[in-house]
Image (spheres, grey):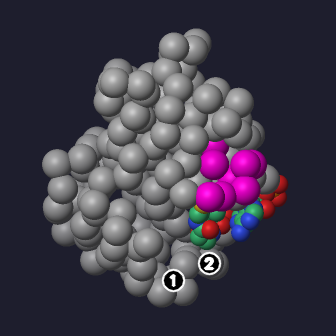
């Protein structure tokens, strides 16, 4: 049985270990710590997957900005997410994405973006962000920068470039 719940105090070290193991380095765990220490952290949207009392996966959504003309529109960036190598390809990552998107919607967020595997995220409803008029702030292949509308047509009137907060400089 796998449980998905919001991170609690005391989970931080295990979250770092999951990310370090999945990504083979500490860039992502440093990013998570930087986001957690910023005002753009949404505690309800840092989720862990727990199996037999052990943390085996983690997903984080935090607030970034779409520069849409004169307007700064807040949206969510899914970054990073990780499942420990020995538990990958068993559906844990999918549970984390599905539960994360549901909770994001419950929190009132209307859309989200992700930079990631183009074979993985479309199954949850992500589409190339360019098709919604949303651009990455750096050059990336079109299919790896994706967006999802959590509320139908919520990106119809919003077009522009994503701006990542300085916490993301940790990994650039
Ligand atoms: C990506 C990740 C979070 C998925 O978690 P998971 O528990 O293995 O995911 P699920 O079991 O729900 O789904 C597995 C699917 O993800 C795909 N996937 C996993 N890693 C992938 C990769 N590096 N590139 C492309 N697809 C990948 C698998 O091919 C599989 O697809 P299938 O169902 O068509 O066979 C996990 O593999 C991981 O931690 N990878 C290393 C870190 C990483 O790449 N994080 C995401 C950054 S965008």
Give, as a single range, the part of the protein colored magenta.
139-147
**In which quadrant of the rendered image does the C terminus lie?**
bottom left
Residue drawn at the location 34% of the way across and 24% of the way down: 70
Number of numbered discs overlaid on the protein picture? 2
- Specify which label sits upstream in the sequence, 2 or 1: 1
Q: Confirm or deny contact between disc 2 and disc 1 (CB under 8 A).
A: yes
Ligand 1 position by quadrant? bottom right
Residue drawn at the location 58% of the way across and 54% of the way down: 115
Look at the numbered disc 2 and give the secondary structure of its residue: helix
**Residue 1 badge:** none
Q: Residue 41's spot in the image, x, y percent?
A: 25, 49
Look at the numbered disc 1 and give the secondary structure of its residue: helix
**Distance between the Cα atoms at labels 2 and 1?**
7 Å
Q: Residue lying farthest front? A: 70
Ligand 1 within 8 Å of the CB at mark 2: yes
Q: Is residue 3 visible?
A: no
Residue drawn at the location 64% of the way across and 27% of the way down: 132
Q: Which residue is mark 1?
A: 21
Q: Which residue is mark 2?
A: 85
Q: Which image quadrant for residue 92?
A: bottom right
Nearest the viewer among 101 and 144 is: 144
Q: Residue 140's spot in the image, x, y percent?
A: 65, 58
Depicted 18 relative to depicted 51: above or below? below
Q: Residue 146's spot in the image, x, y percent?
A: 63, 43
Taking the image as shown, residue 81 lies to the left or right of residue 146, namely left
């Amino acid at each position: 049985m796998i449980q998905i719940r919001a991170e609690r105090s005391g989970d931080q070290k295990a979250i770092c270990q999951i990310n370090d193991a999945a990504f083979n380095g500490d860039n992502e765990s440093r990013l998570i710590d930087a986001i957690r220490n910023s005002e753009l952290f949404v505690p309800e949207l840092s989720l862990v997957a727990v199996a037999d009392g052990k943390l085996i996966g983690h997903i984080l959504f935090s607030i970034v900005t779409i520069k849409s003309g004169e307007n700064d529109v807040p949206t969510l960036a899914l970054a990073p997410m990780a499942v420990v190598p020995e538990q990958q390809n068993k559906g844990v990552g999918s549970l984390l994405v599905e539960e994360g998107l549901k909770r994001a919607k419950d929190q009132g967020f209307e859309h989200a973006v992700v930079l990631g595997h183009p074979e993985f995220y479309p199954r949850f409803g992500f589409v190339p962000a360019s098709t919604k008029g949303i651009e990455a702030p750096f050059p990336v292949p079109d299919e790896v920068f994706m967006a999802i509308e959590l509320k139908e047509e919520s990106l119809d009137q919003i077009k522009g470039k994503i701006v990542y907060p300085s916490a993301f400089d940790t990994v650039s």
